[in-house]
Structures are given as C-alpha cells and as structure tokens.
Image (spheres, rainbow, N blue to C red):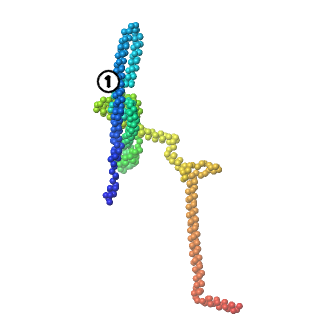
Amino acid sequence: MSSQSAAGVHEKPKSLCTLILQFLFGHVGLFLLVSAVAVLGALAFMELEKENEHHRYLMKQNKAKDLADAYNYISSYLWHYQVKPNMTFDKWQKEVNKKLKVLETFVSDAVTTYNYDGTVEGWNYDWTLSKSLLFTISIMTTIGYGHIFPRTFGGQMFTIGYAMIGTPLLLVFLGRIGSGMSDSFRYIYSRCICRWCRTRRYQNEAGMGQRRKRLWEDDVGKEDYMPTDQVQVPIVITMIMIALCLILGAVIFSNWEDWSLSSAGYFSFVTLTTIGFGDMVPGNSFLDDSNMATFKMGVTIIYCLFGMSLISMCIQMMQDQIVGKVRWVAEETGLVDSEARQQQRVRARRTRAGAVPETKEDLFGYRPLSSENRRRRRQKKDKNGDKDERKEKERREGEEKKDREEDAEEKRDGGAEQEPKSDGKAKGGQPDEALSDEEDMLFNMA
C-alpha cells in the first residue's frame, strides 16, 4: 500500500519534446538559438545576394575601363588644344576646365553607383560573413546601421520574414537576460551595500545583553527590514553603471577602429540605445579572416547584446523611481487623489444595492436620507424591534406564570371547601336524619 502511494507521488515523466523546449527557452538555450538564427540568416543573405554582387562587380570593372578610356581621351584632347594655332592661355584654360568638369562628374558617378575604387580588378565585397552577421544583428536588435542592404527582391522579402522571427526572439532573450541581471544587481545592492544598515537595525532591536539577529538568518527577499524584493536602487548608481558601460565600449572601439575616444563613446551610446544612425559602423577591425578578427567580431556582438540589456534594465529601474516620485508630488499637491482618499470616497458612496449617490432634494423640496443614514436607521429600528419583542415575550411569560399561580390557589381553596361535606356524610346519617325530623314536625304543624 505504501509502495502504491509512493508511486502515486512520482511525477509523470516528461516527453523528449518538452525537455527540448525547456532547454531552448532557458538562458543558455536562448543564447544558442539566437546565435544559430543570426549565423543562418547571415549565410542566407550571402547566398541570396551573391549573384547580384557578382553582377555589380562586373559593372564596376566595365566602368573602370570606361574611366581609363576617358583619361586617355582627355589627355589627347588637351594636347590637341596645345598645338592648335592662335590659342591663347585663357582660351586653353577655359577649355581644359570644361573637360575636367565632365571627367569629375563621370568619376563621381562611378564611385557612388558602381563602388569605383581607382582600380579595375579591386572590389570590396559587401556580403562577407562578418558583414552579413553584423547586418543580421542590426535587424534583430532594430539598430539598422544601413551600411549594407539587400538589393534583390528575394533578399528584401527574406528580410521582412527574418525580422518578424528574429526580432521577437532576441527581445525574449534580452528580457530574460535583463530580468536576471536586474535580480542579481538588486540582490548585490541589498545584501552588500545595505548590509551596514541592516546590522545597525538588528543591533538596536536586540537591546542590551540580548542576542541580535544575524544577517545569514534572513529570509532573502522577505526580510523584515529593507526586503530585497522591494528595495530600489538609487538613480545615481544606475547612472554610474550606464557611464561605465559606455566608457568600456569607448575604450574598446577607439583601439580597434582607430576612432577618437569621444567618437567611440558616441557610437556606443547610439548603438546600445538602438538609435543607429549608421554614420559610424564597426567592421574595420575584423574585415580580414584571421582568428583575431573573429574574436573581435564576437566581442562586438556580445557587447551589443549585453549592453542593450544593461541599458534597458537601468532605464526601467530609473523609470519606476521617477514615476513613483512624480506620483508622490502629485498626491501632495492635490493633482491626483491618493489611494487612501479614493478608498474613503468609494466607502462613502457605497450603498447596499450598489446604486448611485442620491440627489440632495427631490421634486417636493424634501431632503432624502443618504444611504448611510438609512442603513443606520434600519439597524437602529431592528435593534428597537428586538427589544420590544423581548419585552413582549417577558410580559407574556409573566402573565402565564401569574395565571398558573392563581389556578393553583383556586384548586387549593376548592379542595378545602369540599372536605367538610365529605366529613358529614362520612359520620353517619345523624345530621341528615335530624334535619329530616324537624322538617316533618314543621310540616305537620303547618
């Protein structure tokens, strides 16, 4: 019997699918899932845009050859002007400036449209693994640097579907990370920075000669004084954390990207707040295929993800405190009713039937009683009615008791009167016989 009850206590074993889902939506599983989605998206974009990029490379080569022909034409044309008779220096300079202006426009269009770099064979590929991975991260984080973008119809449609899947997934991951970071930071602040305050409080509560409560005896999260679940981190500390995060990014990217410290700090802030102007884009430090470039790329991505979680956590904690302080000021100044006043108002307006408050006067000018006064009068009437019923009951009981006593006395008196008659009859018939003789004598005399 005991074995059956113990077997009944055991939980039903979970299926393999349930265990896989629990792992995937945990902290480690979400990180691996986000990483896999980012890498697969980068490979997909590389495959979708490969043909178009190769076509653009061929167009750039043709444009570079055209520019080379233009250079030769301009040089020969200028030589022709030089040997032309009756050519003054002013006329020659005017014609040269006109032709150079045309060449300048031609070169500018080649650079802007065809990525012309001054060579025929050179080409800066957009859809490499590092750039594609940075592009997918910018989509999932909604930063959107804009340094590269899909040009084909398939790539654009895939971007829409990828954003609808990758962005919510990353937001769930950042929410999990931010929640864990918030709980950890609140725990550290409560148990370390607030340690001295709790110790002093426990000493004052213990008194002289008594054992004070130890900190390790606290129920963490539900302490009697400054509970960890309700403690609020000061805004100054959250601002310091944000500044340290931005300074760390400024130091890293100023060394890797050859930026100034202020520009790197500006890039860190724009990136972590998901503003993403696109005027400064990381990538110069990991354009090559070396192991160091791969390490830098990983550090950049991890910094962006955890930095965004940290900034979001700090802003949320600051927002909670600011909203609380603004509400307190509004309640003190009378702009907003406090919860206590609202409860009092609701309590005063509440009726038994749940009706709305009555008007002050009716059609005939009488002031009807409020629901609260009617309730009190009804209670008073009920109490008075109970008293009258008790008095009436006591009166009836007294009358019934008096009636019973009178009946008992009458019964006793009736028994005493019947007792002599029975005695006369019991002594014989002498008195009866004497009365009968006298009646006979009187009858005869008459």
User: Camera-side residue: 409 or 301?
Assistant: 301
Horizontal side of 82 relative to 291 (left or right) equals right
Which residue is pictured at 58% across the width and 51% down the height? Answer: 370
Q: Is residue 412 visible?
A: yes
Which residue is pictured at 37% across the width and 25% down the height? Answer: 114
- Mark 1: which amino acid? Glu
Horizontal side of 428 relative to 172 (left or right) equals right
Q: Position of residue 381 (x, y in %)?
A: 57, 58
* The quarter of the displayed image where residue 116 is located: top left
Which residue is pictured at 34% across the width and 19% down the height? Answer: 68
The residue most toward the top is: 86
- Counting the numbered discs, the total is 1
Q: Position of residue 417 (x, y in %)?
A: 60, 81
* The quarter of the displayed image where residue 387 is located: bottom right
Q: Secondary structure at mark 1?
A: loop
Q: Position of residue 102 (x, y in %)?
A: 40, 18
Which residue is pictured at 36% across the width and 48% down the height? Answer: 218
Q: Is residue 111 above or below residue 160?
A: above
Mark 1 surroundings within 10 Å by alpha-carbon count, few (fewer than 14), some (14 through 19), many (20 or more) = few
User: Camera-side residue: 145 or 87?
Assistant: 87
Q: Quadrant of the N terminus?
A: bottom left
Q: Position of residue 407 (x, y in %)?
A: 58, 74
Residue receiving disc 1:
121
